[in-house]
Image (tube, coloured by chain):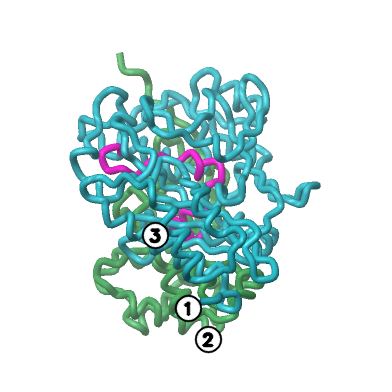
Amino acid sequence: MKAFDYHRAETVDDAVGQARRGARYYAGGTNLFDLMKRGVEDPGALVDIGSLPLDTVRSTDSGGVLIGALVSNSAVANHPLVRTSYPLLSQAILSGATAQIRNMATVGGNLLQRTRCPYFMDPAFGACNKRVPGSGCAARVGFNREHALFGASPHCVAVHPSDLAVALAAHDAVVHLHGPAGARALPIAEFFALPGERPERDTTVAAGELITGVELPASPYGAHSWYLKVRDRHSYAFALVSVAVGLHIDDGVVTSAAVVLGGVAAIPWRVPAAEAELVGQAPGPHTFAAAARAAVTDAQPLPQNGFKVTLAANSVVRALTRAAGRSQLRS
Amino acid sequence: MTPPVPTRPIRLTVNGIAREINADVRSSLLDLLRERIGLTGTKKGCDHGLCGACTVEVGHRRVLSCLTLAVSVDGADVHTVEGFADGDDPDPMQRAFIDHDGFQCGYCTPGQLCSARALLREFADGELSAASFDGDPDDVAAGPTRLTDAEIRERMAGNICRCGAYANIVAAIRSVHEAGDRRS
């Protein structure tokens, strides 16, 4: 590993100032430190933000919740406000990584983690446009069993690994940023970037901007949500496919719905067409099957990941069934 | 000319003993514990956060010492497997691993023990696992009432045992939980 300067920031402005001079933000380290060991990342300077006062969860005046960027994944998943009003968020977080990693990893870092595409993770592979822009994409013609079904480009077929992000997308979360140009709030739907011509960019966060928190509006999905994660082993693996669903059911009819797929794109893949199949209908197998068909209609599988289309469709049905709950189901 | 390697004084309290080590800023907590302090109980398996052999407690939370940049936890309270036994008297979890044959080669065992002790504390505090969502819906708000084998397995998922002693590890943890006998 290359040597680097290390500075522990005392204030947000101090941290942003260090980042403006080229330092990388460092918090839990579970992803960045590992990528530094592997030689994928080689920052010349780190600014440790672990002491900044961004470590609380609180309710907002509008009935939502504001989660500080430095709250650990474990603390978010176990917070009473999250468990009672946003159980989908708890379930998604607890479906990812392990207790040890969730204790270390922060909310901000979770959103900024890099893909686990094996060609990105190992500099021994020459071609990876995300790691070395312009070098090519080894996954397109190589091992692509775990890769994207949606939104990929000729330059990159990697998927985003976060479970948290998929649940945040279902809740229309807003990411709070503080940067050299001041503060701004970015809807989660605009936070992640599809690869297009520039797969080295995972997000639309500008250079030097710091995530200070994530805000969730009041949720209609507290009573009916489910996060289903399908992977090669039962726990401690990244998703082949995941599904976050939320249903608001009023008098036997779905009045609003969120359906977001994970593990299938470089961004959480929200599917409005699937949500449209649900709204106004009674929850049940026929409605759920229609939503599942709509969810995968636009899939563009790669040579090795065609199975993920069927997996995603079946996962949507199963997640909706669990979210609706037995008492709500009509055949 | 190669730039000088930056070193930093790192202060830690390890198993109750205050330490100050001048270390390369790139050091992981794992390497600091093993190579500089001489506490080799904590094991290096994969060194990439995939196996759990390096699990220790920092600030009374279980973490992976291989993915912990030592300088980032300057001033922290660290607990490793060396601090569990009271002299020659093993901790209840260590005793249970022996009684239930919870290991074969033993390489993953220090990490398993750290995780197992933390697991019982986390469960007692009402913390959730992914398995908690398969039970009564009330468990999500209130915390699961029963530490089922499925709960133990999910909560121990971050500790890999290549010898495959899992069934006995689960039995060991279950026995300590049922006896209500923990020192941690």
Which residue: 55% across, 74% down? Answer: B183
Q: Subunit of mark 1?
A: B
Q: Which residue is mark 1?
A: B92
Q: Which residues are magenta?
A: A94-120
Question: Is A301 displayed left or right of A43 in the figure?
Answer: left
Residue plotted at (65% across, 69% down): B141
Camera-side mark, 3 or 2: 3
Which residue lies at the image location 45% right of the left edge and 35% below the top edge? B22
Report if residue A106 lies within the magenta region.
Answer: yes
- The verdict on residue A318 being magenta is no
Percent from the top left, x then y, of residue B83? 47, 64
Please provide percent x and percent y for residue A258.
Answer: 56, 54
Chain to which the residue tagged by mark 2 belongs: B
Between disc 2 and disc 1, whose residue precedes? 1
Secondary structure under the numbered disc 1 in the rendered image: helix
B1, A148: nearer the viewer: A148
